Image (spheres, helix red, strand yellow):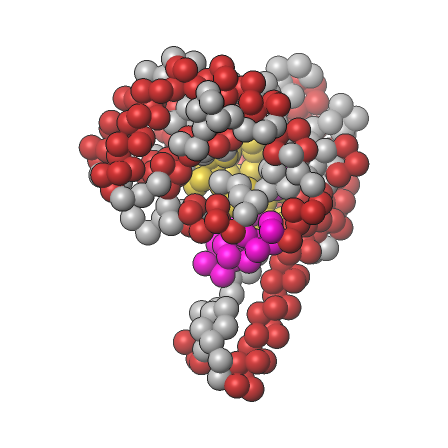
Amino acid sequence: SLGWGTWSWGNRLLFDYDTSMDEEIYQSYRAVRAAGISVFDTADSYGTLDLNGRAEILLGQFERRFLQEIEEEEKSQDNNGGKFLFGSGSTSPPVVSQQVATKIAPYPWRITRGSMVSAARESLKRLEQDKLAIAQTHWSTSKYQPFQEGALWEGLADIYDEGLCEAVGVSNYGPQQLQKVSARMKERNVPLATAQIQYSLMTYKDCKDMNPVCDEEGVRLISYSPLCLGLLTGKYDLDNLPKSNARKQLFRELLPGAQGLLNTLEVIAKDVDKTQSQVAINWAICKGTVPIPGVRTLGMAEENLAATGWSLSAGAVDELDRAASNVGKPMIQNIFQTK
């Protein structure tokens, strides 16, 4: 019901990333892995300028360190019977294998199907892994370079045929374009497993049409940015804005029209004794999506993990739906989002 995003890892523009944050990010990673989270969404473009690909590199490094620490702790258990990461004795739960879903950016120079396959191989090198769980195209080029779209789809299918992934997926595709790519993948006998869009209470008016199409095509709907870059956490107002200049300006524009929604979110959070972040993520789960919130601190990880294991009432979901439909200025959609 919950995956994890890595958009902020290496992103200086929106999240003020610095390599000094890596240890704290790892502690959050360790917490979510210990809690049983296995699906991690990333991209070959995550990272800024010289840090391009940073998220994939960290994801591979973190998993290897995590598994090594488990092995060391199990050895210590055997020696002194102490309680470690997963407790002690034969009741310790097995570690679920990490599943990486990476997105390949359709850069202007990736105009051949072979360039997609090469990009997947480069991602695997950064991850230091042999196979992806899901290879995804990061966005559609149909709005500005439609001739490239066919090569992207064929390249995605080739990645699967060459054994480099278990399934494929798309990102920032609307219902119409999703049906087109789904038809082509069926012709190629390639499993189209996921479609992800920006799906949150701040985008609900624009994204709710994806649910029935995903159900029809047998595709899991992934909701990225379920907290709208942090706006839905309740931690910000016009007197307390994010440090990032980009997010600061965005929140100045969005917060005035979102007050009704934020007030409703606050009331429901108090009613169910949860935080606003937990309610916003749980709402996305109740809408049939798999949220992939991103975190950089242990506290954020623990808070977001507590968004699972319970469900909002149908009445609370309906109330949030109405509040979301009345937002004055919704969050802007990704510029590459298609119909």
Is residue 5 among the parts visible in the rendering? yes
- Could you say where residue 111 lies in the image, as x and y percent from the top left? 76, 26
User: What residue is shown at x 45% (from left), y 58% (from top)?
Assistant: 35
Left or right of residue 10, residue 318 in this image: left
Quarter occupied by residue 226: top left
Q: Is residue 235 above or below residue 300?
A: above
Up-down relation of residue 108 to residue 282 (above or below): above
Question: Residue 254, position in %: x, y?
Answer: 46, 17
- In the current view of this chain or complex, which residue is farthest to the bottom? 79
Task: Please name whichever residue, 263 or 108, is drawn nearer the observer in this view of the structure.
Answer: 263
Give me the residue at 60% from left, 49% from top: 25
Q: Quadrant of residue 92?
A: bottom left
Residue at 31 percent across and 25 percent down: it is: 263
Q: Residue furthest front?
A: 239
Residue 197 placed where, x, y %? 50, 29
Q: Which residues are magenta?
A: 24-46
Specify whether 2 is left or right of 325: right
Label tally: 0
Q: Is residue 145 left or right of residue 261?
A: right
* Above/below status of 104 relative to 123: above
Q: Is residue 165 above or below residue 186?
A: below
Residue 269 colored in magenta in the image: no
Closer to us: 276 or 111: 276
User: Looking at the image, which is closer to me, 148 or 276?
Assistant: 276
Q: Is residue 193 visible?
A: no
Measured as percent of width and height from the top left, residue 201 is found at 38, 27
Q: Residue visible at 26% across and 32% down?
A: 267
Q: Quadrant of residue 12?
A: top right
